[in-house]
Image (tube, coloured by chain):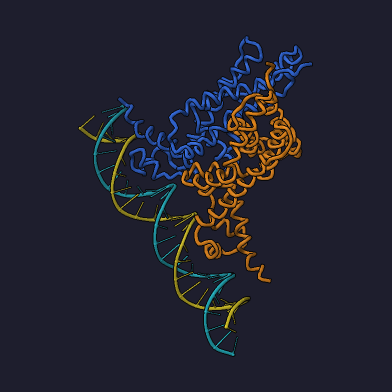
Chain colours: A orange, B blue, C yellow, D cyan
Amino acid sequence: MTKHINNKEQAILEAATLEFFEKGYDGARTTSIARNAGVTHAMLHYYFKTKEQLFERIFKETIGLLGKSLIGVFTGSDKPVLEKIKDAVEFHFNFICENPHLPLFIIREVVSRPERFKLVKETISENAGGLMTILQQDFDKAAERGEIENVEASTLMLDMLSLNAFPFLIQPLFQAAMGNRLGNVDKFYETRKKENIELIMRRLTPSKS
Amino acid sequence: MTKHINNKEQAILEAATLEFFEKGYDGARTTSIARNAGVTHAMLHYYFKTKEQLFERIFKETIGLLGKSLIGVFTGSDKPVLEKIKDAVEFHFNFICENPHLPLFIIREVVSRPERFKLVKETISENAGGLMTILQQDFDKAAERGEIENVEASTLMLDMLSLNAFPFLIQPLFQAAMGNRLGNVDKFYETRKKENIELIMRRLTPSKS
DNA sequence: CACTTTATTAACAATGTTGTTAATAAAATT
DNA sequence: AATTTTATTAACAACATTGTTAATAAAGTG
């Protein structure tokens, strides 16, 4: 029964997450967070000393999520390279689908306070540091065998990131455009996923030698 | 010689543009803008009544830029469809290259205040409203002739937007990662442009029937 | 030149926002 | 049960930020 102690703390965290995701650090109001969490705003400062600290907690959590996803993207398997990449794109798309706010959140906060990039960098290199070189070797070998087009792993990575993340970055625009009367967002996502996979696959198809 | 009247106004506008681009509306400070413009901060309110109005001025200007670029992207020419698209992707990439802050600016401000989307929407439909349907017809005809793969114009548009805009969205991250010791950003951009064109071209290549 | 409008300044008002504190209640610990 | 630690509240302090005002100078206009 010591759980109800965390109740309020948890409520604050959840409200803060929403607020920071939506409005960014600068636009977020601790009073608003407290109100939405259903606690007095002194409570917020009791649990999380300052706005900055509350933010950092959420920022780190979010970055952690990003890190974990990176491991997932290019996890080893015995499938042929092309299949592996296809799986990776799909996995990455699904991840963003489940965390649609994540790209803008990170970009926005790093742009307005570049110091914050340190954390992002660390997390990325921790989780995906070695993977890129291994990946590149895989690519090189497959290219030599004529399975795929010769390509830089980092290039393909940016392709995938761009294609998968961007639609979610502008999704709020879409939603505003559609006036929320778009029940078939899911269908749009499915189509997008296929389109992105298709693009990457075609990119990798060896041109006839 | 009545130009020096506008001098301060102009200085404020320029400082404000920088500030809003970098920190967003919420993070921007009118005092900071005034200071950077080299004017007293009462001056700012003299010329632009409120922060909101100053922002709107810049927001509209920026949206206008976006609008003008859209007209440029798919301007008619007598080249074959594939060439036209190639040109479009290149044009669009160059435009973002010259306005690298624009994508994040618009996305950020619309997300934190969705009302602002109205303006974006109007500008887009004003400038690219008819174009999309014409484009689609072009595509359909070309597809029928077997010149290109059958594809939705909107799909291709989002592909292009994603590939071209995203690298600039995360460019600040890049820059932080490289610690500014990257003089060859230009080379990166050239490579990116080629990569994006390549991706779109391959997407459009008809699979052997 | 008289006067009206525009530009500019410094000081200040109003408000919103973050963070604190002192008092109190509840829970845990001994 | 006494005491210490944790939770909670309401009021408030401190500060930053936006916006105003009243006084003054400069420029333009009849």
Apparent side of residue A140 relative to residue A86 in the rendered image (left or right):
left
Instruction: Inspect this view and state whether residue A69 appears.
Output: yes
Q: Nearer the viewer, residue A11 or A208?
A: A208
Residue farthest along the top direction in this orientation: B78
The x and y percentages for residue A47 are 55, 64
**Residue A37 location, x and y as percent?**
62, 59
Q: In the rendering, at what x and y percent does residue A90 appear?
A: 71, 37
B74 relative to B42 in the view: left or right:
right
Task: Determine whether A151 is above or below B140 in the image.
Answer: below
Q: Residue at x 63, y 43 (%)?
A: A70
Q: Quadrant of the C terminus of chain A?
A: top right
Q: Is residue A20 above or below residue A131?
A: below
Q: Position of residue A26 (x, y in %)?
A: 50, 48
Write the residue at 61% across / 28% down. Answer: B161
Most distant residue in the right direction: B209
Tell me which corner region of the image, top left, top right, bottom left or bottom right, holds residue D13: bottom left
Left or right relative to D28: residue C30: right
Check the image and report above or below for B79 versus B133: above
- Please indicate, yes or no, whether residue B71 appears anywhere in the rendered image: no
* Number of numbered discs overlaid on the protein picture: 0
Residue A5's image quarter? bottom right
Task: Report the front residue among A73 and D9.
Answer: A73
- The residue nearer to you, when weighing B46 against A106, is A106
Tell me which corner region of the image, top left, top right, bottom left or bottom right, holds residue A84.
Answer: top right
Residue B77 to residue B162: above or below: above
Quadrant in which the N terminus of chain A is drawn: bottom right
